[in-house]
């Protein structure tokens, strides 16, 4: 079978032939096998909400225009997209709840494997949440912060917005959201309400359903904000660190363990315990000891906090096993391909699931909970060391492909770097450069890989266009992975691709911050849940200028949006007033009403909107244009 390798990643090009010769199907083969994909589904016109269905509405008007219950195309499309926002919110908020519950128990002294590594951040969070910090120990404060955070899953007063969103966006924005009835008061309730109102025979008014979805997306923002901030307090706030990215970080001489998924509660302990078990790996014959590498968002988490190299991002996670030198892949939650255990079986690789509610057929399961964190990590690492002994030298094929990446730009790290330029007023240099036009605007790249696109390609094209036009670039999630792997997250990239104004600023700040050169072209802000970091920075700018987020020359771009989480992120980005580019066609175009609402109607409601453009060259130009117009609006 001819394989279509829809990727711009050289490592993928190098390893797909290995899969072919071994008779292993990868995501690219499965993509091909799915062609042509269902037109009804692609347009959002397939409804499976009840067992009278599935129903589908004919996009050309020749066949049925309603489902059996009478739901029309607009209702069906709106329900489908709102449910995606709810699922995204649930995923991020479960992650956040897990962290908050763990922190509450750390506060009670019940979890010896965890500490509060950044008490300064903890205090800052407490002040932000208006918690009295006086005379409290670090542990007491951790307990109080976690308890107040958990109220965002419990509050029943509809008139009281969730604590975290209320503490994270400008007052003007909060008022606007409250007026529209989309300010979430309780994450769980908001998700449940979307499921309830989209049940058969409930909310059928497409605009109303869609707004319900936006409220869920804003609950997603709330969930990820708390996940990010609490993780910083527990595991440390990221600061710039130099590392490497792409498949070449897998080391022939070491026991290679990939951590894949999202939740730092597991990966942090694996990193800690791997140091203590390093000698065991050497004794087992691996001179390099233990080499932890990251994949997807866990990769981002450990990369920004510990400089752990990144093996790859979402679409190429299978490639790590195809190197024949990966001894274990340890996974937790989200974006883990169920194909991994089968591919692991073709090699010696242990694929290990760790979460009770995230298992895979054919994988080994080692149950993780915070109480047994250290013992679980030891067990998992021992499985990897044992697997190393079963490696087949003839099957090892590690393409020597990796790039330097400077990562770890939390909002605090950005402010620290700016403070080297102006210690008294760190925001001033950034504002001044925006006003003079050295920096035209800010773009946040977020989201996934998607087989609908050529992996990583649009990210690079759009970023280069924006950089040449002096737009400051931030990135998270698999977007960050795309830039790190392809050499756009380092100082050389700044020299090569930044416009003159941007280059001057990145150089001045980088030199002042002691980096002996410019800041990297794209600033790594972390994993998907860390998209909230960009909003922290944007809110500081907006508050300073006494404007709303929608007034800033700020755009977001998700060139390869794929997951329900990405749908939720793009939607809260719109809800917060940010023009948000999607490079993949959302499954909504079967309804003109919903499509117009998303691309035009949202402008009036929120100031933000979905900008759909699948051509990366045009997308870059359009985003530059949006930024130009925002500047005109501000009179700069
Ligand atoms: O949370 S960017 S493919 S790995 S959903 Fe998934 Fe998308 Fe990657 Fe991280 Ni985010
Ligand atoms: Fe069909 Fe209506 Fe049931 Fe959807 S909810 S499957 S449109 S009958």
Image (spheres, rainbow, N blue to C red):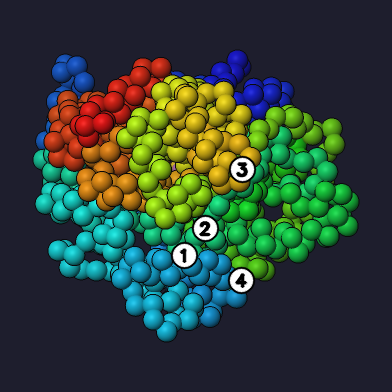
Q: CA distance from mark 1 to mark 2?
A: 7 Å
Q: CA distance from mark 4 to mark 1?
A: 20 Å
Q: Nearer the viewer, mark 4 or mark 1?
A: 1
Does 621 appear above or below 634? above
Q: Position of residue 66 (x, y in %)?
A: 14, 30
User: Is residue 227 in view from this perspective?
Assistant: no
Name the residue: 30% across, 42% down: 573
Residue under pointer 3? 515
Q: Position of residue 130 (x, y in %)?
A: 31, 71
Mark 3 within 8 Å of ligand 1, using the beta carbon: no
Residue under pointer 2? 237
Q: Nearer the viewer, mark 3 or mark 4?
A: 3
Q: Nearer the viewer, residue 77 or 304?
A: 304
Q: Secondary structure at mark 2?
A: loop
For the N terminus, the quadrant is top right
Name the residue: 39% across, 77% down: 133
Residue count near mark 2 (Cα–Cα under 10 Å), binned few <14, some 14–19, many ≥20: many
């Amino acid at each position: 079978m001819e394989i279509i390798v829809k990727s711009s990643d050289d490592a993928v090009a190098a390893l797909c032939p290995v899969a072919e010769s071994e008779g292993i199907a990868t995501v690219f083969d499965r993509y091909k096998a799915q062609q042509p994909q269902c037109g009804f589904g692609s347009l959002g016109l397939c409804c499976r909400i009840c067992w009278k269905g599935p129903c589908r509405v004919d996009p050309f008007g020749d066949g049925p225009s309603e489902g059996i219950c009478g739901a029309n195309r607009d209702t069906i499309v709106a329900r489908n997209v709102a449910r995606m926002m709810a699922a995204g919110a649930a995923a991020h908020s479960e992650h956040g709840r897990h962290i908050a519950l763990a922190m509450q128990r750390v506060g009670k002294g019940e979890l010896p494997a965890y500490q509060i590594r950044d008490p300064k951040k903890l205090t800052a969070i407490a002040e932000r949440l208006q918690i009295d910090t006086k005379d409290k120990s670090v542990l007491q404060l951790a307990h109080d912060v976690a308890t107040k955070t958990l109220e965002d899953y419990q509050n029943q007063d509809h008139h009281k917005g969730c604590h975290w969103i209320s503490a994270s966006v400008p007052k003007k924005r909060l008022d606007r959201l409250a007026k529209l009835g989309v300010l979430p008061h309780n994450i769980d309730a908001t998700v449940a309400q979307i499921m309830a109102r989209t049940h058969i025979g409930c909310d059928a008014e497409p605009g109303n359903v869609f707004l319900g979805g936006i409220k869920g997306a804003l609950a997603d923002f709330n969930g990820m904000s708390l996940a990010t901030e609490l993780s910083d307090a527990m595991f440390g706030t990221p600061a710039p660190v130099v590392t490497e990215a792409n498949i070449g970080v897998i080391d022939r001489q070491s026991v290679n363990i990939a951590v894949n998924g999202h939740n730092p509660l597991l990966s942090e302990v694996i990193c800690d315990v791997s140091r203590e078990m390093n000698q065991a790996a050497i004794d087992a014959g691996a001179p390099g000891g233990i080499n932890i590498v990251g994949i997807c968002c866990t990769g981002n988490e450990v990369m920004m906090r510990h400089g752990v190299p990144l093996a790859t991002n979402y679409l190429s996670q299978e490639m790590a096993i195809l190197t024949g030198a990966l001894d274990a892949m340890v996974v937790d939650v989200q974006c883990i391909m169920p194909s991994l255990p089968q591919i692991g079986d073709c090699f010696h690789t242990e694929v290990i699931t760790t979460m009770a509610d995230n298992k895979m057929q054919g994988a080994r399961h080692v149950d993780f909970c915070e109480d047994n964190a250290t013992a679980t990590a030891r067990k998992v690492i021992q499985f990897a060391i044992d697997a190393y002994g079963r490696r087949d030298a003839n099957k090892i094929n590690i393409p020597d492909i990796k790039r330097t990446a400077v990562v770890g730009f939390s909002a605090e790290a950005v402010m620290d770097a700016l403070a080297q330029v102006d210690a008294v007023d760190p925001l001033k240099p950034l504002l001044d450069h925006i006003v003079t036009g050295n920096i035209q605007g800010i773009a946040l790249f977020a989201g996934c890989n998607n087989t609908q696109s050529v992996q990583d390609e649009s990210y690079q094209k759009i970023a280069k266009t924006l950089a040449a036009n002096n737009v400051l670039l931030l990135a998270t999630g698999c977007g960050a992975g795309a830039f790190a792997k392809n050499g756009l997250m380092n100082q050389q990239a700044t020299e090569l691709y930044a416009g003159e104004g941007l280059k001057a600023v990145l150089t001045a700040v980088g030199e002042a911050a002691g980096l002996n050169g410019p800041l990297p072209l794209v600033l790594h802000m972390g994993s998907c849940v860390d998209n909230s970091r960009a909003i922290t920075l944007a809110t500081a700018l907006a508050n300073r200028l006494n404007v709303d987020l929608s007034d800033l020359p700020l755009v977001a771009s998700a060139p390869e949006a794929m997951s329900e989480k990405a749908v939720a992120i793009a939607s809260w980005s719109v809800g917060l007033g940010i023009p948000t580019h999607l490079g993949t066609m959302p499954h909504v175009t079967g309804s003109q009403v919903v499509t117009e609402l998303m691309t035009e109607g949202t402008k009036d409601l929120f100031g933000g909107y979905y900008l759909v453009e699948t051509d990366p060259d045009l997308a870059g130009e359009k985003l530059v244009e949006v930024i130009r117009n925002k500047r005109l609006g501000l009179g700069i």
